[in-house]
Amino acid sequence: MATPGPAPRPPVVQVQHVSKDYKLGDETVHALKDVSFQIDDGVFLAIAGPSGSGKSTMLNMIGCIDTPSSGKIVIDGTEVSGRTPDELADLRSRTISFVFQTFNLFPVLTAEENVEYPMLRRSDISKTERKERVAFFLNTVGLTKYAGHRPNQLSGGQRQRVAIARALATRPRIVLADEPTANLDYRTGESILSMMKAINRAFETTFVFSTHDQRVMGMADRLVRIEDGEITTLGVRVGKVWKYAKEKEVQIPTNDNELQQLLRDDPELRRMVMEDPELRRALLDDNSAPSIASKGN
């Protein structure tokens, strides 16, 4: 009799029919509209879309910084709807960490003090363990000899590495990264992304990016594309090939002229199409896009 393999791990994030509305003067802005998807444990996922598409709003929802107007979000088995601010803060401190494009380091603290800071509110982490984790993760990002430096003594890439070490030190299930390469030069950005991908593989930490950077999408193994607050495409990388499914009917060009117009209007999509023949075929022929389950992939 064959020995059964390990049971599949449940998704670390479930987003179920989430909408988010904001009041802007007398108008209501629909930032997200009935969005549903889930994030498997250990993936490297990009939430992509043009400015104003709702991708940052979605990241804030997953990070429990903001709450839905309707729908449900489940983080590591815990539904966040109706939770108190203290309960959400506790969930964030144990499950979620953030990496921001502006680094968000405390300027008066050294690199090691910045990495240690989010662990100070964790009564379950002793002082000895905090010090061990600080040393380990500064070494992981290659900054051991800069432990005593303050942010103004570090380069942009080094500051982002400190921010990544800080995010990892609490040993979160999920790292949320909001345009983490936006303030870095091209070469430094490449190095940071490669390091984050290596950490994702080594520690099986789930990384979720809000981005319009093609390099992030190139390294991702999952893609959620949002436009005007709605999911237009879900992508799963299978080997070197992307498989796509749409949750929403979007403009599908019926001829080359319409395709050219669509690509002119969306530079990000243009880059993706140039690099991915599967997506190009999906745009030209709706029936040619491989079918995948839009939930749980």
Image (cartoon, helix red, strand yellow):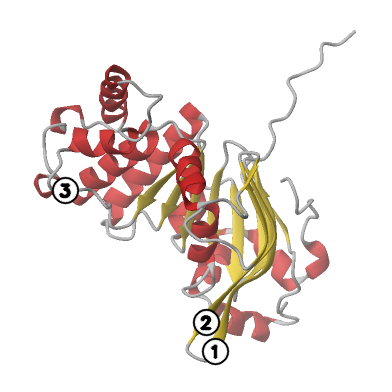
Which quadrant of the rendered structure holds the N terminus? top right
Pinpoint residue 235: horizontal percent, then vertical percent: 66, 54
Residue 90 in percent (x, y) is at 47, 41
Does the rendering let one see residue 242?
no
Q: In whole angstroms, how far apart are the C-alphas of marks 1 and 3?
A: 43 Å
In the image, what residue type sits under mark 2?
Answer: Lys
- Residue drawn at the location 72% of the way across and 65% of the way down: 282
**Callout 1: SS:** strand
Which residue is situated farthest in the bottom direction here? Answer: 26
Secondary structure, mark 2, is strand
Q: Give the quarter of the image for residue 263.
A: bottom right
What's the residue type where badge 1 is placed? Answer: Glu
**Mark 2 and mark 3 residues within 8 Å of each other at the beta carbon:** no
In the rendered image, which residue does mark 1 sit on? 27
- Is the residue 173 above or below the residue 231 in the image? above
Going by the numbered disc 3, the residue's amino acid type is Ser
Tell me whether circle 1 and circle 2 mark residues in contact (CB < 8 Å). yes
Q: Residue beneath label 3, please? A: 155
Residue 196 x/y as whole percent: 41, 40
Mark earlier in primary sequence (1, 3): 1
Residue 164 sits in which quadrant?
top left
Which residue corresponds to mark 2? Answer: 23
Q: Answer with left or right where residue 111 lies relative to residue 141.
A: left
* Displayed quadrant of residue 128: top left
Q: Secondary structure at mark 3?
A: loop
Report whether 240 appears left or right of 99.
Answer: right
